[in-house]
Image (spheres, helix red, strand yellow):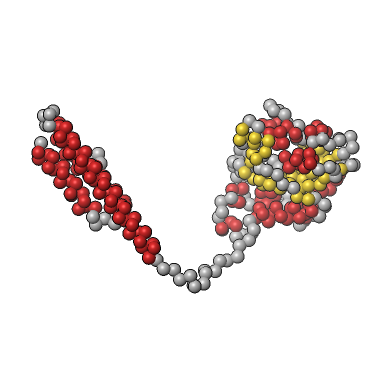
Amino acid sequence: MSDLISNLEKLGDEFGTVIAPLADEQAIRAAQAQFLGKKGKVSELMKELGKLPPAERPLVGAAANKVKATIEELTAARLNELAQIVARADLARSVDVTLPARPVGGGHLHLLSQVRLEAVQIFAELGFVMAEGPQIDTDWNNFEALALPKEHPARDMQDTFYISPEIVLRTHTSPVQVRTMLTQEPPIRIIAPGHVYRRDDDPTHSPMFTQLEGLAVDTDISFSDLKGTLLHFVKRFFQRDLAIRLRPSYFPFVEPGAEVDMQCSFCGGSGCRLCKFTGWIEIGGAGMVDPDVFANCRIDSERYTGFAFGMGLERMAMLRHNVTDIKFYYEGDLRFLEQF
């Protein structure tokens, strides 16, 4: 027993000698494992414990615990010494603050910011003003006010992130339209760009993307006004004489509703791989504001009419600049960003 206790006590001194020249934490931790690990020196000696009489085992166990504590204390002390050395070296550094700063190259706006500002400017030419709202909004503003009551099947088209049963990450910027109609008397002419959130993730969809919506409310607003507005935008944005078409479609908050297609900007309508050889590319949705939406926003639908439209800015930028994956916008890769 006495030999076993003596050997255990020697391990403490041996460990101190081993770590004294070590100058980084990884090496010190490795040395600690050589002594206290499952196959370490202390564990190897403790295998002899079973050969001793039961009465002597507590004494050996106490010696083993003592040497373990010693090794841990030596480890902590050595690590503290290294930390102090690093701190002193850091304090001893001298920096010549009179040296001129390294030149930083000029940056530029992100492609999506460029497209957003340009789109807002184009609609401003038609008298639209920009409106904004919170990205976290109520279920009522995001759905119910837009003729989408709870359990309405059309909600399935917008995979929603819920903060609580009544609070959501907005799935479109339409809540901005609701907030505007509740606080402003017609005539109304707004454009609402901003981030929206849906549970989509593939090369052409992202859980977060930028949407641009427009709303016009006044007396005698017609479907032809909607088409003329969108046609002006497409021609100005793509700088080409492209046509548009409106295909009947269902959206709960407009009646009638339509999908908006434009002539393919790559083939000019003759047909190519991008437009699937149809000559047309879908760019968004639009329609005349549903009277139920006007009623929810306290606007007299007998006196006023209006149109609304929405499109994804990422998609518009993809079509103009031939971007093949929506994730390129968000990866921060300079090789992509510097092209625009």
Is residue 319 visible in the rendered structure shown here? no
Q: Position of residue 10 (x, y in %)?
A: 15, 46
Up the image or down, 11 lies above or below 333; here it is above
**Which residue is at 68% across, 32% downward?**
155
Task: Please give the name of the residue rendered at 16% of the width and 32% of the height, measured from the top-left corner.
Answer: 58
The image quadrant where one finds the C terminus is bottom right
> Where in the figure is residue 331, as x and y percent of width and height?
56, 51
**Residue 329 can be seen in this image:** yes
Please count the marks in the image: 0
| In this rendering, position of residue 330 left or right of residue 24 | right
Q: Residue at the far left: name it.
A: 2
> Where does residue 259 sit, x and y in percent of width and height?
76, 40
Percent of width and height locating residue 16: 21, 51
| Quadrant housing the N terminus | top left
Q: Nearer the viewer, residue 329 or 102?
A: 102
Residue 169: quarter of image: top right
At 28% from the left edge and 52% from the top edge, which residue is drawn?
78
Which quadrant of the structure image shows residue 288? Answer: top right
Q: Residue at x 60, y 57 (%)?
A: 337
Vertical position of residue 317 compared to residue 155: above or below: below
Q: Nearer the viewer, residue 184 or 268?
A: 184
